[in-house]
Image (cartoon, rainbow, N blue to C red):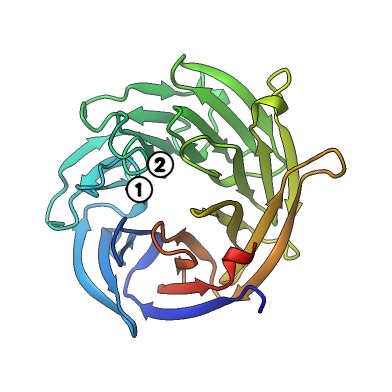
Amino acid sequence: MSVQIIPHLELPVEFTLFHCSWVPCSNRLVALGSKLDGRGHIAVYQMGSQKLQPLGEGTTNKALKCGTFDASAIQDRYLATGDFDGRLQLWDLEDLSRPLWSVGAHEDLINAIDGAGGLGAGGADAPELATASRDGSVKVWDPRSRDRPVACIKPECDRMRRDAWALALNQDRTLVSGYDNGDVKMFDLRTMSAVWESEVPKGVCSLQFDRKDASKKVLATCLEGRFHIWDMRPDQDEEKKLSRLDCYTEEKATVWSGSHLPQNRDVFMTAAGAGSSLALWRYSYADKESDASAEQVQDVELGEQPISSFAWSPDKMGLGVCVSFDQKIRTIIVTQLSTL
């Protein structure tokens, strides 16, 4: 039997959906977005066999764009969010009446957020959050010292400022950021230095390392049906130039996001198209006989509006959740992944 992407549960909601995440080590998920009046909304659901059951919700002053659990210890599972007003907040899902911490992180919309040193490290490393904003800056935060960032990466002058659309952070304290003009830049936070940069033809919508620890690849999804994969292995890094695989989807529409399967770093899902389209891919490394490649394994169309966010369950292989601009939360099941 071949790999199949099977729609499972579907729940319409009354707010615009921008982001979704699984709550680690649980059957719960969280969705973030915006109410009609421009306020932000957090909703927590429990996944049952027949439906998604609401567990709790909270409202913020401004619409919420993005979120992550990756800088939180597993016993806490605090959610960090970024909003349309540039505010970074930390939430306890058991009490969404007010944030645990709130700081004006940026002068404009926070487009993307990522974390490291929490869940993936078992709490052993110092937790860090990274935020990317329309104001052109990328900042790194330690949730334990909350008043100011521990690092700030921004252009030297306003004329060089680009909208920072995407970023990714790993446990080696390597940060990669992507911009609306196609620039991609990598920084080593241990030395506070830029170590590599590249440029792709179209704006970068999302970035993700294939693993938080011992990253081998970084995936960038872009406008007009494009995505790119850089091989980060040491023997590939000659003169600080990483080898790159350029890929194109059949439909030349925005590839909104890319997400690696937690249980297999060489398998990833992309959300693309004018409709709710998911595609599953398998990456093959270059060797002496062939170049690197990405093969589309399966795809599925779920609706008529774009998917704004997709997330794999870190705990159950093949279980995923996505949210789309038709105001629907959907869970999906991917079968036969162990055969890839």
Quadrant holding the N terminus? bottom right
- Where residue 257 sits, quadrant-wise, is bottom right
Left or right: residue 128 compared with residue 192? left
At x 60% / y 37%, what residue is drawn? 216
- Where residue 11 sits, quadrant-wise, is bottom left
Q: Which residue is mark 2?
A: 114
Between 145 and 136, the residue placed more toward the observer is 145
Q: Residues within 10 Å of mark 1 (few under 14, many from 20)?
A: many
Left or right: residue 107 compared with residue 175? left
Between 323 and 282, the residue placed more toward the observer is 282
Secondary element type, mark 1 = strand
At x 35% / y 48%, what residue is drawn? 68
Query: At label 2, which amino acid type do we have?
Result: Asp
x, y percentage for residue 269? Answer: 58, 60
Marks 1 and 2 in Cβ contact (< 8 Å)? yes
Secondary element type, mark 2 = strand
How far, Cα to Cα, is label 1 from label 2?
6 Å
Q: Is residue 302 visible?
A: no
Left or right: residue 18 compared with residue 184? left
Query: At label 1, which amino acid type do we have?
Result: Thr
Q: Is residue 233 visible?
A: yes
Between 151 and 182, the residue placed more toward the observer is 151
x, y percentage for residue 33? Answer: 34, 60
Q: What numbered label is drawn on residue 68?
A: 1
Query: Along the polypeptide, which appears first: circle 1 or circle 2?
Result: 1
